[in-house]
Structure formats: structure tokens, C-alpha cells
Image (cartoon, helix red, strand yellow):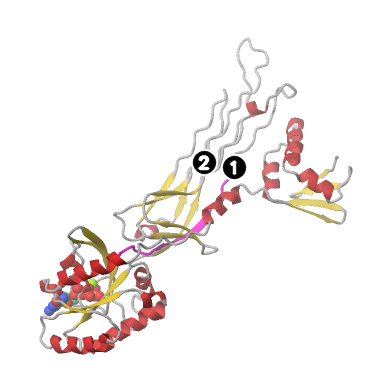
Amino acid sequence: MFVDKAKIYIKAGDGGDGAVSFRREKYVPSGGPDGGDGGEGGSVAFEVDEGMRTLMDFKYERKFVATSGEKGKKKNMRGKNGEMLVIKVPPGTVIKDFETGRVAADMRQGQRELLLGGGGGKGNSRFASSTRQNPRFATPGRKCKGRFVTLELKSIADVGLIGFPNVGKSTLLAASTSAKPKIAGYHFTTLKPNLGVVGISDFSFVMADIPGLIEGASEGAGLGHDFLRHIERTRMLIHVVDASCVEGRDIVDDYEAIRAELINYSDELLERPEIVAANKMDIEGADENVKKLEKHLKSKGVEVFPISAAIGEGTKELMQRAAAVLKELPIPEPIVEDGMIEEWALERDAKEYEVYRQDGVFFVDGTIVQEILARTNPDDPDSLRHFQKLLKDFGIIKTLRREGAKTGDTVCLEGMEFDFVD
Ligand SMILES: Nc1nc2c(ncn2[C@@H]2O[C@H](COP(=O)(O)OP(=O)(O)OP(=O)(O)O)[C@@H](O)[C@H]2O)c(=O)[nH]1
Ligand SMILES: [Mg+2]
């Protein structure tokens, strides 16, 4: 099956921890701290690969974790950085946060970093000062949260070829571009959109052959919704009908049935410019059918181009008209992003915390508290002093005071209790 939606797990690399180490050299009695910083974690980036047409690869590989930064080393050596993980996606891939459904990126071209790797921790040599000559603590690297994202492929094409199965959409694509879609006399020959470039003198546009639609497609019948999603992104439609009516259907009914599915799927498609290609004109009886359709469409102002895609008749005129229509249409905007990437980045840097009082105990909860605790070695007096400084720097002491905390009160930081000293 053609996969145009996938759910994957992505995680940026954690920052490496800072090292605790002391110089030990011959003839140097007290060498001092020399623990290096941890390396940075690798980021997760997405890159458009123009050659990719489906999200098929993500059916088998679903977990993408960038490498972590290495721990700091002695002699003030920094840990190695993690490597950036680049995930290749086809053009037109929309990346969404799985939980909220909000858009993180609409990949059209180039590369975008979506998840930043965690920063490395600081080695103990960073904490040396005149009053603290031998710090026995270092800070851990920042750990990154993994998350699920949804990838949705919405092909980017200027023109979408739509219509019932077997009407000759792929034949028209093959006649007008260098694409080589599969063509055969049965329904659903095309199972995924094929793209081709149409060149009209100095103008060119991308045309997509979309798998055949049937009645109920907007509710998921046939290949249904999967393909209407691709139509959503086109700028105009060429609605292909089989003028020979060899399959015994009525040409006007066919036309209206497809229109109904489009509109049912999205009101926006109602506004999309459309021209009709009445195909298979080489077959007897086609003339009459075309007249019938033209009469039906006259009042709606929809143009009908009689063609015979199999022998390339009338196709050039049709493409010229499509080019003329496209020239008048605005260039489509990428799907509006929802500030998701910024939020992911902020989440890592969240400085928020909450202070509340219960049974005389002051509770402080929040990611920043976890961060501060993770950086603290409770058995080390220097580290504890540093811990107090961090509480002050982040305004937690001030907030506690404002909430009424006095010297001797119990404060519970993410489960760890201590006495408040003002
Ligand atoms: N006589 C005649 N046959 C045609 C013409 N165009 C296409 N066909 C035939 O119609 C059949 C279907 O053509 P396709 O191009 O595969 O049709 P499609 O609309 O892409 O079909 P699906 O991919 O199944 O939706 C093939 O046997 C073609 O050879 C034409 O202009 N004249
Ligand atoms: Mg086809």
C-alpha cells in the first residue's frame, strides 16, 4: 500500500555529563580540578529529498534517536559532541506533534532542525574559585525528551489530475511529461501519485496523476481520503472524464459524482480552478457525449477540452490552457506552522516552578527544580552551597519568602526536604 502517513519517534541526543577529576602529576602536590565539560547531544533534523515520493521507509524504521554527547574527561578535555541525525523526507511532508496535532514544519525544501540536542554539563574545573579550590561536583548534561511526531505527505503539485479509475489520467501524464506511470486497462492501476513536469515554452509546472476516485471517496471508499489529501495541495485541477463511456456510465453523472466527493472532502476544493479533459475521443460515440457534457457545464463556466491522450491529440492545447490558468494564480503558501518547534525548545529550558503550602510545608515543584537537584550532590558541602545559589538565582528563595516561609520552616523540593534558612 502507498504510505502517506507515518508516526515516528524522535529524540535529540542528551548532553554529556561534566567530569569530576583532579590533576595528578609528578611533583605537583595538589593539582586542582581538571574535569572537562560534557559534549553536546546531537540534534534531530529533517531534510527534503527530492527523489523521495512516499513515506514508505517509515513503515519499517520508526525510531530516530540522535547520539548523545560524551562525558567530559580529565585534563579538561571536553566530551565529543553527538552527531546530528538527519531524517530524509519527500517534499510536501508536513510534520505534526502527535499529541496536539499542531504543525511543526511543512517541509518544502532544504533542511530544518527540529529538536535541538541537550547541552553538555560543566566539568568540575569550572567551579573552582579562590574560596572553593577543589570542587567535587560537576553538572550533568541536559537530558532531552523524546516525542512522537506524525508525518503526512501532501504532494506539492500545481495541477492535479483527478477522475474515476481507468479514464486515462496516467496516459495524459505520460503524454505531457517525461514521467512513466503504469498504464493499464483496469481500475486502480495507479496506487500512488506520480509527478511529472510539463514544459510550455518558458513556463513549466508540476502535474500529479492521482489514483482514481470513486463514489464515497470522501468517506474513505476505495483509496479515499488518502488521495484527496494530495489534491488539497494542488493549485488547479484537470478533471479527466472518459468521453467514450465504454464502461457504461453517464458522462454527466461521472462528472458530478467526482465533484460531489471533492466538495464533500473540503469546501476549499469548490473554489479550486478546474478544466475538464474529455478523453478517449478516438472511440466512437465520444463526440455525442462531449456535447452533452459541454451543454451541462456551459452555465457553470467550466471549459471542456476534447483529447485523446493515447495518441497525444489535443493534449498540448490542454496543457497550454492549464499554464495560462496557473500564471494567474497566486503561489501557494506553506502550511502555517504553529510555533511547535519553539515550544519544544522552550520545554527543555522551562524555568517554571510552582510553590504551594500544605500542612505547614512549602512545596516547590517544576522542571527547573528537577534540573537543580540533578546538578546537586547532597553529600558535598560545596555542591550544596552552589545549590543554594541556584535557588536564589532562579528566584525560588524570593518566592518562598513571599509565600511566607521563615527560617526553620520545612521546604519540600520535588520530594526532598530541607529547612528553610533565610
Ligand atoms: N482508446 C483510448 N484509450 C485510452 C486513451 N487514454 C487512455 N486509454 C486507455 O485507458 C486505459 C486506462 O488508462 P490509464 O491511463 O491507466 O487510466 P487511469 O485513469 O490512470 O486509471 P487508474 O490509474 O486505474 O485510475 C488504458 O488501457 C489506456 O490505454 C485514449 O485516448 N483512447
Ligand atoms: Mg493511473
Q: Relative to 327, is 360 on the left or the right?
A: right
Q: Residue at x 13, y 81 (%)?
A: 281
Residue 142's tag is 1
Q: CA distance from mark 2 to mark 1?
A: 8 Å
- Crowding near pointer 1: few (<14 within 10 Å), some, many (20+)? many
Q: Amino acid at mark 1?
A: Arg
Residue located at (13% from left, 76% from top):
308
Q: Note whether 351 is above or below 151 in the view shown.
A: above
- In the picture, the quarter occupied by the N terminus is bottom left
Query: For mark 2, what is the residue?
Result: 41
Query: Would you call the spot at circle 2 few (<14 residues within 10 Å), some (14-19), or many (20 or more)?
Result: many
Image marks 2 and 1: residues in contact by CB distance under 8 Å: yes
Amino acid tagged 2: Gly
- Residue 133 horizontal side relative to residue 153, left or right: right
Instruction: Mark yes or no: residue 347 visible.
Output: yes
Quarter of the image where one finds residue 244 = bottom left
Q: Residue 406, image x and y in percent?
A: 88, 45
Q: Verify whether residue 154 appears in magenta.
A: yes
Q: Residue 71: say if magenta.
A: no
Residue found farthest to the front: 328
Q: Which residues are magenta?
A: 143-158
Q: Position of residue 89 (x, y in %)?
A: 37, 55
**Label 1 CB, ligand 2: below 8 Å?**
no
